Amino acid sequence: MKRSAIVLVMLFLCVSCASAGASPTEHDLIIVRDDIPIEYVIGLPFASAHNIPLLQVPGDALDANEQKQLAGYYQNGARRVLILGGVDTAISDAVEETIREIGYEVERKSGLARENTAALFAIETWKESPQAVVLNGSVEESYLVGLQAAMQLSCPILLTNDTTLTYDTSRALESLGCETAYVIGSTIEQGVFDELDAMGIKYVHIGEDIDPHEVIERPDDGLDLLSPASFIFGAIIGIVGMYALLRYRSTRQMPEVPLFVLTEDERTVVNAIVRAGGELRQDELPKLTNYSRPKVSRIVNDLEGKQILMREKKGKTYKVSIAKKFINRK
């Protein structure tokens, strides 16, 4: 499966990579498997909030380019890697050993199921949060809207099923000191809300009644997640990108993506490629963006993993091209 099969086109995008060594947290890098969206969904809000690179790698083995990228972070001061997911279901022992051989200290957070992994990550990495996003990890349609909320709130994402809160999710909500839960999706049943009430946790249900044809403009000062309009906006973002998230399909017509969902660095790179006619050689980007080669390489890798860009090997460099049509909507 292609690494680009994971598409979290919009927000997803928000992992701003300051120097890994500058991270104030216990980890300098977070690593997830490249063809399983849910660990990416769990890890991205924390990575974004703390300016930690989140890398998507194959579950079975690292190729030379991936090892080189990890070595580059190590040379820049990164030392502590967190792997999200188990040995059998996400990142193998072989990949972990390769990371250790580069020189990293490696910690792994995983549970018997991904609900357990999300809860463990929230308890031990976020530690506390007055807010949390709760969604059914088996319903991929919820991922985009859940990420939209979690990224803006800077809060963890927890997983449950449609009928009841899982034990680990309940435990995580209590441990975090959560006061408000943002519950995502129209399939969540009343039992989940009753349990939140019993725990004394306020809740907001997002995505219950959405008109996909309604157009909501983004306010200049950002979204207020306490307003119904912003929930609708987040859901519309999810609907627009749903096709791309669920499975990659080649098509002549480029999917449309709002430009504002990219970080400033990502917009700079994308705009440089657009001005060049939609494709160029990767080695042209440092001059066009005034970014260093390692920074350009990191941004391009991130955008390729999210299917914003496509790369094709050309001699000693790559041809980079735009994979999405961008809408300059504010």
Image: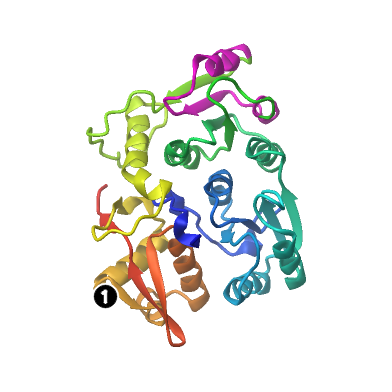
Residue at screen point 36% across, 35% down: 235
Q: What residue range appears in magenta?
A: 169-198
Crowding near pointer 1: few (<14 within 10 Å), some, many (20+)? Answer: few
Residue 181 is a magenta residue: yes
Residue at screen point 48% across, 62% down: 2
Describe residue 24's horizontal placement relative to residue 226 as left or right.
Answer: right
Rendered location of residue 115, percent (x, y): 64, 35
Q: Secondary structure at mark 1?
A: loop
Rendered location of residue 163, percent (x, y): 55, 20
Q: Would you place residue 235 above or below residue 287 in this image? A: above
The extreme bottom residue here reads 315
Rendered location of residue 239, percent (x, y): 33, 39
Identify which amino acid the numbered label 1 is placed on. Answer: Ala
Report whether residue 295 is seen. yes
Q: Which residue is mark 1?
A: 276
Residue 5 is a magenta residue: no
Dividing the picture into quadrants, the one containing residue 312 is bottom left
Residue at screen point 24% across, 61% down: 252
Describe residue 97's horizontal placement relative to residue 7 as left or right.
Answer: right
Report whether residue 10 is seen. no
Describe residue 115's horizontal placement relative to residue 214 as left or right.
Answer: right
Rendered location of residue 273, percent (x, y): 31, 71
